[in-house]
Image (cartoon, rainbow, N blue to C red):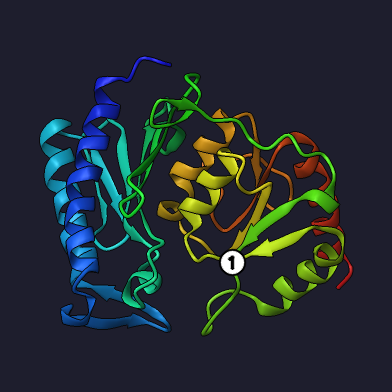
Amino acid sequence: MAAISGLMRVMERAARKAGGRLRRDFGEIEHLQVSKKGPADFVSKADQHSERTLWDELRVARPGWGFLMEEGGEIPGEDGKPRFIIDPLDGTTNFLHGIPHFAISIAVQEPTLDGKGWGDVTAALVYQPITDESFWAEKAQGAWLQDRRLRVSARRHLDEALIATGIPFAGRGDINEWARIYAELGPRIAGIRRFGVASLDLAWVAAGRFDGYWESSLYPWDTAAGCLLVREAGGFVSDYKGRSQPICDETVLAGNDALHSKLHKLLAGALRNT
C-alpha cells in the first residue's frame, strides 16, 4: 500500500466528520429544511452543514489554500497555493428521497506555473458515508479503496461492458444529444446504469464495478476527484472530443484503454451524424 500523505489524512478526516453528520441527517430527512435552488436541483441544510464542516476542517489544516465549492462558490487563496474543489453532498436528490447512494467529493488542484490558471489535480477523495467506503488517489501513487489497490476493469468487449451515465432532466443537459449517444451505444453494450452521483460513477469505474461512463453538463466539483481516481487506476478520461484535461466536466468519457477507445469512436459518430 502507498504511504498515506498528511494531506490525504486531513482530507479523509474532514470527509468522515462531515459524513457522520450526513448519516444522522439522512435518518431524519423528513425534518430537513429544503429549498429550491433551481430546476430539479435542491439544496438542503444537509448540504450546508457538510460544506461548513469541510471548510472548517480544511482551512485550518491548510491555511491560505483556495476553495471551489458547490454551495459556497470560489474563495481565492494565497498566490501560488493549491485549492480544494468540494462537493459536500453529491447526490442530493437521492438523499432527499431516502435513497442511500450519495457521496462527499474532495480534490486538490495545483496552480499553473505562471499563476494565471489551474493545472493538475494531485489528490482526490470520494467518500460514501452509508457504506463507509473511502476511494482515494494521489498523483503517481495509484488509486485505493481504503487499503486495497484499485484497477479499472479488464473487459475489452462492448457486449460485456456495464456503462454508467447521467440522463438530462428538468431543463439541465441536452436530451437530444444524450438520445443519439444512447441509440449508438445501447444496442452494443451489456447494460446501462443511471445512479445519479457522478463522483461515485467515476470512483466505481476506477474500482472496476463499472466498465465505462459518459455524461455531460457537469461541474468541476462533480468530477475533479473522480477523474484522478480513474487515471490512477489505469484508466482514461477525456471529453467527448477525446481531449484529456485535468478536469473533464462539461463532457466526460471514462473507461479502460480498450473500451474508452471503442466508446469514443461510437460517441463521436453519434454526435457527427446530426
In this rendering, the answer to whether 260 lies above or below 144 is below
In this rendering, the count of numbered labels is 1
In this rendering, the answer to whether 69 lies above or below 125 is below
Q: Is residue 153 left or right of residue 98?
A: right
- In this view, the residue in front, 112 or 211, is 211
Which residue bears the numbered disc 1?
A: 194
Q: Residue at x 78, y 43 (%)?
A: 259
Q: Amino acid at mark 1?
A: Arg
In this rendering, the answer to whether 180 lies above or below 31 is above
Q: Residue at x 78, y 58 (%)?
A: 190
Rendered location of residue 81, percent (x, y): 27, 30
Specify the quadrant that holds the C terminus: bottom right
Element marked by disc 1: loop
Instruction: Specify the quadrant of the image occupied by residue 1.
Output: top left
Q: Is residue 1 left or right of residue 66?
A: right
Answer whether residue 80 is visible to the viewer in this image. no
Rendered location of residue 201, percent (x, y): 54, 53
Answer whether residue 77 is visible to the viewer in this image. yes
Rendered location of residue 68, percent (x, y): 31, 50
Q: Residues within 10 Å of mark 1 (few under 14, many from 20)?
A: few
Q: Residue at x 70, y 71 (%)?
A: 178
Instruction: Specify the quadrant of the image occupied by residue 100.
Output: bottom left
Q: Is residue 170 left or right of residue 265?
A: left
Q: Residue at x 54, y 46 (%)?
A: 204
- In this view, the residue in front, 27 or 49, is 27
Instruction: Specify the quadrant of the image occupied by residue 243.
Output: top right
